[in-house]
Image: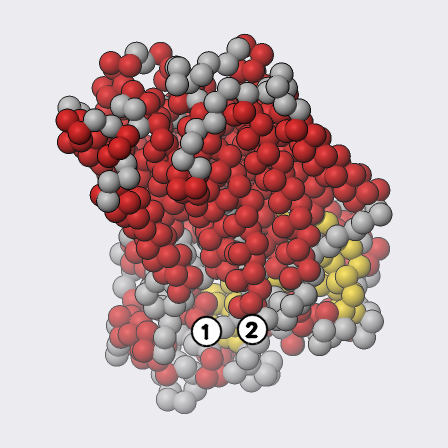
Amino acid sequence: MKEDDPVNRKQLWILLSAIFLTSFSLIAFEITLSRLLSVLLSYHYVFVVLSLALLGLGMGGMFVHFFRPQIPTGEKRFQVLALFTSLFSLTIPFSIIIIVQVGYIDDIQMNILLYGFLLVFPFFLAGVLLSEVYRMFPTLSGRIYGVDLIGAAAGSVGVILFLNILGGISTNFVLGVMASLAAVLFAMGGLRKNNRGLIISAVSFLILSILLGVNLAGGYLLDIPIGVNPRKEIHDALSSFRGKILETRWSAFGRTDLVEFNNYPDHMDIYIDGTAGSPMYRFNGNVNDPGATISNLKTTFPGYFPFLYLQEEERNNALLIGPGGGRDILLALMGGVREITAVEINKDLVDLVRRYSWFNGRIYKGLKNVNIVVDEGRNFLKRQKEKYDIIMLSLPVTNTSRSLEGYALTENFLFTTDSICDYLDHLTDEGRLVVVGHNDAEILRLLSLSLAALDRRGVSITTAMSQIYIVGTDEYLVFVLKKTPFKPTKAFHMYQAIHQFDLESILSYFPYIRKVGTINPALMALGSGKIVFKDLEKMVKERGYDISPVTDNSPFFYKFEVGMPKPVSLVFWSSVILFGLIILIPSLYWKKGAIQRETHLNKKRYFDKDLLRSVVLFSMLGMGFMLIEISFIQRFVLFLGQPVLSLAILLFSLLGGAGMGSIWSGRFPPNKINKGIAMTSLSIVGMVLGYTFLLPIILNQLLGLDLTTRLLATIFMLIPLGFLIGIPFPLGIRWLKERSLENHIPWMWGINGVSSVLGSVMTIVVAISFGFTEALLVSAGCYFITFLIFLR
């Protein structure tokens, strides 16, 4: 075969344009899936399903390697690509249609298996398509991989726009049309001898366009079966309490539902992805006489208790993080707080509350002393110089994620040892942090965080416990941390009041109370110094819960399981096994002699060595990139303040930079490929190590800047790293071509795909066990191994 069986200029532009559309559709589909699955499933199940689906990319490469040994030539290449792209485009919307129907099955384990099975197909076909492309055009790999990555960068930003305008379901129909348009372009590249590919791709484009048009016109309204999963809060609201969804809003942040109740006309609930429920009450606007429903909060909801014993000078201002439907605002108003700043991350929720101002008394837009800010709470706080008498948060019942891999949670950075330090820094001397939780595990971890934060300041456990009290009922627990110790008389008066409000004494803790049987005995022993926190932590661990403190470096507040979470272990070992099989099976096949026939016997030793180096290369590139990507997503969430925006900008910067680097890699002559891979990998190691230790300092210095400047700074910092990351992969493809190993490109693609999934789960494993900083160090190790094997 001649040098890649060259393409003319027209065919090259068609090829690159089709790849751009395919990659745009692929990554946008992955991000949209994470949003749709978050509505259907809890976050750890989203992680499992997405990981299993993404393994399809590697499986597609293996399919080509074993079952399509002949490399198509001439115009037949474009016909083959058109066929696989047409199939890929059809699986995007139809897999979603089937998933929606599966969602009505009331069996969560069966659903997860079916979701994983169904979603493998689109990624499998994408894996077949892309591995075929790289095998057919290895000498063009720099430009192809560059456009592939630039298309993915555009898709990571474009999908945000689609989701905000069209919602989760319709976005998939649009992506299907875009992929089918790519199929049409591929078919146009090989029209001179055969138009069969154009007919197939045109039919798929027509089918998907009609489906999209009918959906947008309202003729075929497909909706997520929300409320079927009993693990979602909204399930009880719709079934047990006979609620009805009044309004739904879709955006890149997620699905927001407003639920009304016929039996409770003064109460509505707002849910995000079917969970994190927040009440909205009918309010007449008069704080002094708000009506029976709101007045009853003073005695029935323990979140009001901290406002009872505030001095007049302790009611000047409050910061409420995550006010939801406005309950915390009502509590603060009834508690006499004069100035309230409420920071809510979900713009759709804010818009809904404002839309129903007639119901809630214009609580989000009609009160002069209430300022509503749409932002991430921790990011907002770190940029403020003002100090507050009260900082209040209500812990959501969270089973949803905003991250690409589907595991890390939106609220993680609100509850770490570092966040407690930030809260304390922004409290007045008599100020206090108030957190409303749902169970003792949450409250005990908050206690763990607070003690660790105060220990950093040189405060002993017994003194720290004099700054804390806990009250609650079977449904809610309230944790209060004061910047300075409570006075004994104040603690005694608060303790006496718990019986007036039907609060459970066995769930409560107050400093200086030492009488046995009055408050929680374990906390009383901790406060009196009879036990240390390690003793309490051990007692809780024996019950199967982990309440050890978490930091910004490992911000998994909701990981209460002892050891590694089962879904993470499942995906990790599944990826390890598949990774081993995908390397060993072709190797054993080669050992039997099937591959030796491709080369002369006197070259066998070099063939062995080159194949081993290529296996290591593409494995390390897949793992290393995912370790960097996911770790940086977590780093920049706190800096930028919006999880969805952080994901989009980070992917755009890294992938866009990698695309430019890939295109630039074509400048390396054949005799410099080895050196290019080695020195680029070493440069990545140096930059990752530099970012690992310098980035926290840089981001902290830039945090006070406006959002636009922070976005530009993020792009400026990440594009150079992305540029370097984009170079080794296309050079590796060319390296295979130079050694007459182009038949193994699909195998290497498969290895790279599976190792990418292994790298994503490895990031979570390392981050839970040690931290995201350590995950970045592991990524540097991956690229250093690449440097070593290509050094000579």
* Left or right: where 469 falls relative to 535: right
Q: Residue at x 24, y 28 (%)?
A: 599
Disc 2 marks which residue?
Answer: 476
Instruction: Give the camera-side residue of 708 and 775.
Output: 775
Q: Please state the total of marks drawn on the protein image.
A: 2
Residue 512 in picture, x, y percent from top left: 37, 77
Q: Residue at x 65, y 42 (%)?
A: 90
Q: Is residue 2 visible?
A: yes
In which quadrant is the C terminus drawn?
Answer: top left
Q: Pick whichever of labels 2 and 1 is earlier in the sequence.
A: 1
Q: Is residue 482 above or below residue 600?
A: below
Q: Residue at x 36, y 78 (%)?
A: 543
Q: Is residue 661 above or below residue 250?
A: above
Q: Is residue 10 above or below residue 55?
A: above
Tag 1's secondary structure?
Answer: helix
In which quadrant is the N terminus drawn?
Answer: top left
Disc 1 marks which residue?
Answer: 440
* Left or right: where 598 falls relative to 443: left
- Badge 2: residue crowd in 10 Å (few <14, some 14–19, many ≥20): some
